[in-house]
Amino acid sequence: MSDRPVEAEAEELQAGSPVLQGERVAFTGTLASMTHREAHKITAQHGGAATSDVSRQTTMLVVGEEGWPLEADGKPSQKWQHAAQLRNEGVAIRILNESDWLHLVNLDGQRQEAERLYTPAMLSELLDVSASTIRSWERVGLIRPVRKVYRLPYFDFQEVSSARRIVALLAAGVSRKELEESLETLRSVLKDVDRPLAQLEMLAQDSRLLYRDEIGLIEPRSGQRQFDFEPTKPPDEPTTGGGHFSNPWRIDHKDRRVHWTTDEWFHEGCRQLEQNDPAAVESFRMCLMEKPGDPELNFFLAEALYRSGKLDGAVERYYAAVEADHNYLEAWTQLGCLHSERGELQSALDAFDIALDLHPEYPDAHWQKADVLGQLNRTVEAIPHWRKYLEHDSRGPWAEQARQRLLAADRSEESSE
């Protein structure tokens, strides 16, 4: 079965023939739709045999679509390389991306699940990346929201996962050239390779134009902070310890802050916020001196105050954000979370209700409201909100908690009958 279209084989499965009959299937990379163990089970259910390694007996290699199938050194996975070598030797191994494999085994619902959109908070839970980092990636164009509801962005999971993988590999010292070569190698089977190549270009292109001070890399003309992954040495500059190079601007850097623009202070505050530096509070206050009442600046100041343990100040700044922009969905949700943390459960429900009035499909607000209702032992009212959340996410940590709570509610109902 080497060259038949995926659609034709899916039709064969629907007609009752096991589409993977006689196939020996291996999987590489992280699957976006399920675990490797689940994929092995599905393979067996459809007549195939799942294998842990690629060999001459392997007939199909499925490439996962969460991030990219790249090793720690930036090269394509060992399974991919072995399969490519065997194909060059004439061995009939078919390489499929995860989406096509899901269609082949008639699991288009799982494929649609992998293509769902996620808010910053959902991605933070799913990918273990802070929501502020996700917002900073959006601000510099590294990731692009698929749509926005008021100020709330929704992202494609694969694009954010791709950015996280590229950032991690660059930070680990893999060169831009090695990553470009690996991504080009994967082009034959994986979709939209041009997008991660563009992300890689964005992360790497400015390294020649930046200088390093005691904090990190900075662009001389604007003073804005930049991603810092591949420090380079100017031709005539001596290196110092750790591979960093000296720079002629270092002495003047702190003095020139008095001349920073609002945008420069904002970028500095965001950098400090990502590193949990309490100095972010003062950076955002400097911004508000020039733009008092700005809803986004108040939102970020609230985030910084919260991380500094100043909960009263954070509440007031979140309220300032929604007073300036009543439709600021993330600010209403953060307000609800803060009220919940402080034990002010009715105020928390009021904030979540406002968010859901503005955006009835907002998954974060549904999950948080259900959580508060659960704390109040109002489980019957919480159930539809947990179910609503699961319509948007079925694989993240919040989804698992929602399923567990629904299961507990069902058991409780059964025991009371």
Image: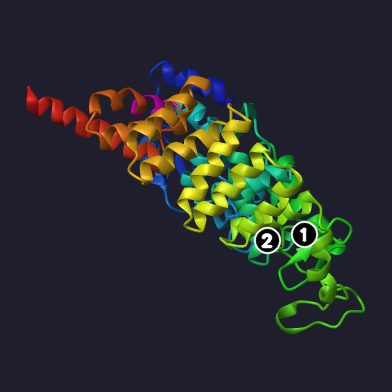
Residue at which label 1 appears: 177
Q: Which mark is residue 170?
A: 2
Q: Residue 55: in sight, yes or no? A: no
Tag 2: residue type? Leu
Where residue 138 appears, as percent x and y from the top left, is 68, 42
Q: Which label lies toward us, 1 or 2?
A: 2
Where residue 339 appears, as percent x and y from the top left, is 40, 41
Q: Is residue 294 magenta?
A: no
| Element on which disc 1 rests | helix
Q: Earlier in the sequence, mark 1 or mark 2?
A: 2
Instruction: Give the answer, above or below, for where 318 lies relative to 71.
Output: above
Where residue 384 appears, as percent x and y from the top left, is 33, 22
Alpha carbon distance from label 1 to label 2? 11 Å
Residue at 51% x, 58% y: name it.
308
Q: What are the residue bounds of the magenta stretch?
A: 386-391
Q: From this viewpoint, which residue is outermost toward the right?
A: 236
